């Protein structure tokens, strides 16, 4: 089960696209604003407020986070 979870996480991070809502490993919620050529991501965390993070800084997709909270 753990190996499948890690594989799914790796696939999600590799296929991330502009507009997807994510949660970072530190708990910051945001939306992918831009996928940079160097592999980093610009994430919009508030109206006109952007931060740059590494792909490895993504914890999970927002919809999965909300589903986990409901359980």
Image (cartoon, rainbow, N blue to C red):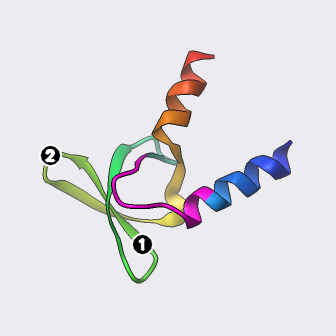
Return the disc, 1 or 2, that comes first in the chain's sequence: 1
Q: Which residue is mark 1?
A: 40
Quadrant holding the C terminus: top right
- Please give the name of the residue rendered at 45% of the width and 40% of the height, measured from the top-left corner: 27
Magenta segment: 12-21
Determine the main secondary structure of the stretch shown in magenta: loop
As rendered, which of 39 and 53 lies closer to the eye? 39
Q: Which residue is mark 2?
A: 47
Quadrant holding the N terminus: top right
Crowd tier of the residue under label 1, counting other residues whose Cα lies within 10 Å: few below 14, some 14–19, many 20 or above: some
- Please give the name of the residue rendered at 70% of the width and 52% of the height, measured from the top-left corner: 8
Q: Secondary structure at mark 2?
A: loop
Q: Is residue 62 above or below residue 36?
A: above
Whole-percent x and y of residue 25? Answer: 52, 48
Tag shown at residue 60 = none
- Please give the name of the residue rendered at 57% of the width and 66% of the height, measured from the top-left corner: 14
- Please give the name of the residue rendered at 84% of the width and 52% of the height, measured from the top-left corner: 3
In which quadrant of the rendered view does residue 7 lie? bottom right
Is residue 10 toward the left or the right of residue 29 in the image? right
């Amino acid at each position: 089960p753990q190996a499948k979870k890690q594989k799914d996480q790796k696939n999600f991070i590799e296929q991330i696209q502009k507009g997807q809502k994510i949660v970072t490993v530190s708990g910051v919620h945001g939306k992918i604003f831009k996928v940079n050529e160097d592999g980093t991501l610009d994430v919009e965390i508030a109206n006109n407020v952007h931060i740059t993070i590494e792909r490895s800084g993504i914890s999970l997709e927002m919809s999965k986070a909300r589903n986990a909270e409901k359980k």
